[in-house]
């Protein structure tokens, strides 16, 4: 491990330092201070908007490096750090870290040593409640640590590696519950979302994405109960939450088999959907399917962003999502009724929208033995990285990609399993940062993106932070004008911001490195 503070680099001699940290309450998560970042998206809305404005579109070019923290042993930081009481908490698979938010000095580093496998594709981050920190492991355990010391308190298996599930999601605290989802695509298994007790990890409620018994809603969109029971729809994106409505908003993954669809005719509910659940019971309130019978592994696991806005002169409680399939949706978050459906990236797989505002798939663009040329490709028009919404500009920001792939079926049998097909390509790829007017779904501005994909952050200083040519970059939130680039390497997580001692920090991960920036004195 190495950290750099100011212009001096030093080795951290102690592996554990006990910091004077307080506990985080549910009330503090519900109404967070602008100077903190206490949950995955900063607050429950998923907007990733900060009211801090010391850094603006007029002075952002004066940002300079405050410190660097290098992972001890490598890895890639995909997690969004939390900042609580002057400490940053983040993860990579099987590891959790605490570093000083002012200096980047390591306070503790926890390693999950009971590893029984799982897929180590990435870890989205942690949750903090009271004096405990929570994260999931690739081998399906929910782990609780002492937030001050990193000492393990308990762990609880919440999915099965034998069934090729794995853990990657950041837990989210809702009331007196931890909300956690599951990942996995290689076996045809049902996805679910759990509410767990923060004291011991015991199950409070579980919502299955696909029907599991006769009479369950959505069963008529599957050819049989057996197919529905193995229908997938993984829940690997952290949820958002409306406390006034006591409603959790969860987005779900692709149905299974992933590409070969011969034995799953129908819409395959509630996969590839945005679903509203009662936070107390897990009971479904409404759903909207972004990709009916998804046959291209596009999922719909993008962040559902809560917007209190105005449409046609009327105040509305809305939820918006830029889906991986290239379509942008705005719904009434109380009823699930569609308000806006539009393309934010040009696609060729749909034939318009049905009466619910859902895309109508083009049968000619389904995967075929001979191949079908489709855009977007398997990576999607966007992916897991977080969008942002600024209530100041009324714009929804998303890192977008347009690319083509040829989609093939390689298992044309009557009973394919797993994937049963694939795509080849990523042709004519074009990356762009786009700003969408949530009221109309129209792209207000679009600028080329030359770096890697990252999450986004917007601020009251009229700045959007995200990936640039070779590192964290800043753009004018109103016009898209490029303002600053850090050149720390491709950003691999969602940037955050916070304020300590009157200084605003901007934090981003770049591979195995966490970097902090501040304005020059």
Image (cartoon, grey):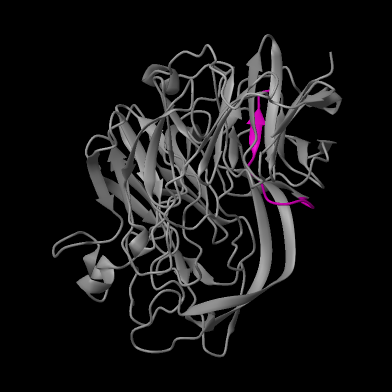
The image quadrant where one finds the C terminus is top right
Image x and y of residue 360, in percent: 45, 69
Position of residue 483 relative to residue 60, above or below, is below
Query: 312 or 448, which lies in front?
Result: 448
Residue ID at (26%, 76%): 223
Q: Is residue 464 magenta?
A: no
Q: Is residue 303 shown to the viewer in this render? A: yes
Numbered range of the magenta stretch: 448-460
Q: Is residue 449 magenta?
A: yes
Query: 153 or 378, which lies in front?
Result: 153
The secondary structure that most of the magenta stretch takes on is loop
Image x and y of residue 63, in percent: 82, 25
Q: Residue furthest left?
A: 214
Residue ID at (46%, 23%): 147
Residue ID at (57%, 37%): 80
In the displayed structure image, the side of residue 481 where residue 231 appears, left or right: left
Image x and y of residue 183, in percent: 42, 55
The image quadrant where one finds the N terminus is top right
Image x and y of residue 498, in percent: 63, 21
In the displayed structure image, the side of residue 155 where residue 7 appears, left or right: right
Q: Residue furthest front?
A: 13
Position of residue 275 relative to residue 68, above or below, is below
């Amino acid at each position: 491990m190495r950290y750099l503070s100011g212009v001096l680099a030093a080795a951290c001699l102690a592996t554990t330092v006990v910091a004077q940290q307080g506990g985080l309450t549910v009330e503090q998560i519900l109404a967070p201070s602008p100077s903190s970042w206490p949950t995955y998206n900063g607050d429950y809305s998923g907007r990733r908007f900060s009211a801090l404005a010391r850094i603006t579109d007029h002075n952002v070019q004066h940002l300079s490096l405050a410190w660097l923290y290098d992972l001890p042993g490598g890895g890639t930081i995909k997690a969004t750090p939390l900042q609580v009481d002057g400490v940053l908490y983040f993860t990579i698979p099987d590891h959790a870290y605490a570093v000083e938010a002012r200096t980047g000095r390591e306070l503790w580093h926890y390693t999950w040593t009971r590893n029984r496998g799982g897929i180590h594709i990435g870890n989205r981050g942690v949750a903090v409640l009271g004096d405990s920190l929570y994260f999931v492991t690739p081998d399906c355990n929910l782990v609780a640590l002492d937030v001050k010391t990193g000492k393990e308190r308990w762990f609880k298996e919440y999915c099965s590696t034998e069934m090729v599930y794995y853990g990657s999601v950041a837990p989210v605290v809702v009331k007196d519950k931890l909300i956690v989802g599951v990942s996995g695509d290689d076996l045809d298994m049902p996805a679910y979302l759990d509410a767990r007790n923060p004291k011991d990890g015991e199950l409070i409620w579980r919502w299955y994405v696909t029907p599991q018994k006769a009479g369950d809603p959505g069963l008529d969109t599957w050819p049989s109960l057996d197919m529905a029971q193995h229908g997938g729809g993984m829940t690997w994106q952290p949820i958002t939450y409306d406390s006034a409505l006591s409603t959790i908003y969860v987005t779900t993954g692709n149905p299974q088999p992933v590409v070969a669809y011969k034995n799953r005719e129908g819409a395959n509910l509630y996969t590839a959907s945005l679903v509203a659940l009662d936070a107390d019971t897990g009971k479904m309130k409404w759903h909207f399917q972004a990709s009916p019978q998804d046959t291209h592994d596009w999922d719909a696991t993008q962040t559902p962003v809560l917007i209190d806005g105005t449409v046609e002169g009327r105040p509305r409680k809305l939820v918006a999502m830029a889906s991986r399939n290239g379509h942008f949706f705005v719904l009434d978050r109380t009823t699930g009724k569609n308000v806006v459906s539009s393309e934010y990236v040009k696609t060729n797989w749909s034939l318009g929208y049905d009466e619910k505002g859902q895309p109508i798939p083009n049968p000619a663009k389904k995967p075929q033995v001979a191949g079908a040329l489709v855009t977007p490709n398997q990576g999607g028009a966007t992916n897991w990285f977080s969008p942002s919404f600024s209530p100041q500009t009324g714009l929804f920001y998303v890192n977008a990609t347009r690319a083509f792939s040829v989609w093939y079926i390689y298992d044309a049998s009557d009973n394919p399993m797993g994937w049963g097909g694939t795509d080849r390509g990523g042709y004519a790829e074009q990356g762009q940062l786009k700003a969408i007017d949530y009221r109309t779904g129209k792209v207000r501005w679009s600028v080329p993106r030359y770096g890697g994909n990252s999450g986004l952050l917007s601020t009251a200083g009229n700045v959007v932070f995200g990936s640039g040519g070779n590192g964290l970059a800043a753009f004018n939130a109103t016009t898209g004008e490029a303002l600053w680039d850090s050149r720390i390497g491709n950003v691999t997580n969602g940037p955050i911001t916070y304020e300590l001692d009157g200084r605003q920090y901007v934090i981003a991960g770049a591979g195995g490195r966490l970097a902090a920036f501040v304005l020059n004195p």
